[in-house]
């Protein structure tokens, strides 16, 4: 009987121990499952955090590239990029709980949507700028071509003006000079002796020129004796930075036809030696000759 009681107690203890063991195993299994669940959740949160940082880094890279293009939207693009950088810092500092990650993902989605709008507008602006640049380049090319053409025309006009000016100049031909004795009858007799000379005569011809301007034409006649003295009026006239001392002025009515001109320079006690006669059209020497008196 006592043995039976002992067996019954032993069985009861074994049963209790078995129940405790089962309970312990069940608790351990639950703890293990919970731990795995937490580990899985933590791993998932970590992955979500890394994904969030990756997406933000991509957004920043896209903004950096757009800002580098230096369009008129650069300031707006910089402001949005700064928001991305700020959110990246927040994500890095966060503990990574699911609620925070969810909030960040929403913010990233908003930033992504804003970026898509800005990048599209920036691309449209670049296209317009390229078109405008092409138009400006085309306009510059046209202006350069027009300038070059105008320079060619200006050169041609200048050459034409020079040609016309050259063609319109009058030519002095047959310049002859000498000394003459004037008799009481008024007759003039050429002489080579200085002491007999009463006048010096200057003869020349203005050639026909249909292009030249008609009207009064004045020439400055300069007669220089053997001692380098200017004879006659000895008046000084200036043409810009040039000056001329002349003996007398010969004014001719020119009508585009050949004109023979004869002028006298009276005097007395003419020096022996070589005389030089120059004809000036203003400051330009258009004729010269010389003669000698004995």
Image (spheres, grey):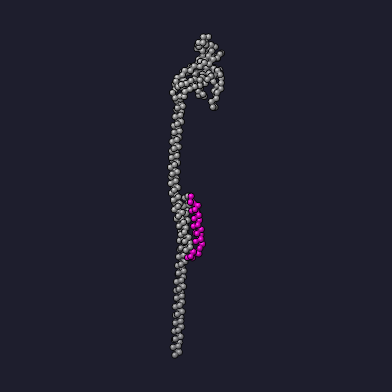
Residue 129 image offset from top left, x and y in percent: 45, 47
Q: How many marks?
A: 0
Residue 125 image offset from top left, x and y in percent: 45, 50
Can residue 87 be found in the magenta stretch? yes
The image quarter containing residue 270 is top right
Which residue shows up at 45% across the image and 69% down it? 37
Residue 59 position (above or below residue 249): below
Residue at the top extreme, as displayed: 184
Magenta residues (range)? 72-100
Residue 40 position (above or below residue 171): below
Residue at the bottom extreme, as displayed: 1
- Quadrant the N terminus occupies: bottom left
Between 24 and 279, the one lying in front of the other is 279
Residue 246 image offset from top left, x and y in percent: 54, 20
Residue 44 visible, this orientation:
yes
Can residue 293 be found in the magenta stretch? no
Residue 291 visible, this orientation:
no
Between 249 and 171, the one lying in front of the other is 249
Residue 239 image offset from top left, x and y in percent: 53, 25
Which residue shows up at 45% across the image and 55% down it? 117
């Amino acid at each position: 009987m006592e043995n039976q009681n002992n067996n019954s107690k032993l069985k009861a203890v074994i049963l209790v121990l078995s129940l405790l063991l089962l309970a312990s195993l069940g608790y351990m299994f639950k703890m293990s499952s919970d731990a795995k669940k937490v580990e899985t959740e933590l791993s998932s949160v970590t992955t979500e955090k890394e994904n969030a940082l990756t997406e933000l880094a991509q957004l920043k890279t896209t903004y950096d590239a757009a800002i580098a293009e230096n369009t008129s939207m650069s300031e707006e693009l910089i402001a949005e990029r700064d928001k991305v950088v700020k959110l990246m810092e927040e994500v890095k500092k966060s503990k990574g709980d699911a609620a925070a990650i969810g909030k960040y993902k929403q913010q990233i989605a908003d930033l992504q949507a804003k970026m898509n709008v800005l990048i599209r507008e920036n691309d449209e602006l670049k296209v317009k700028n390229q078109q405008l640049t092409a138009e400006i380049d085309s306009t510059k090319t046209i202006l350069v071509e027009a300038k070059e053409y105008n320079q060619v025309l200006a050169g041609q006009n200048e050459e034409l003006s020079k040609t016309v000016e050259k063609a319109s100049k009058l030519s002095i031909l047959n310049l002859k000079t000498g000394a003459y004795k004037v008799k009481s009858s008024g007759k003039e007799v050429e002489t080579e002796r200085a002491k007999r000379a009463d006048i010096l005569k200057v003869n020349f011809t203005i050639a026909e020129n249909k292009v030249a301007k008609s009207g009064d034409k004045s020439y400055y006649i300069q007669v220089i004796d053997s001692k380098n003295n200017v004879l006659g009026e000895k008046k000084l006239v200036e043409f810009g930075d040039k000056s001329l001392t002349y003996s007398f002025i010969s004014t001719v009515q020119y009508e585009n036809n050949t004109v023979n001109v004869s002028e006298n320079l009276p005097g007395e006690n003419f020096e022996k030696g070589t005389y030089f006669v120059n004809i000036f059209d203003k400051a330009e020497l258009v004729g010269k000759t010389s003669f000698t008196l004995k």
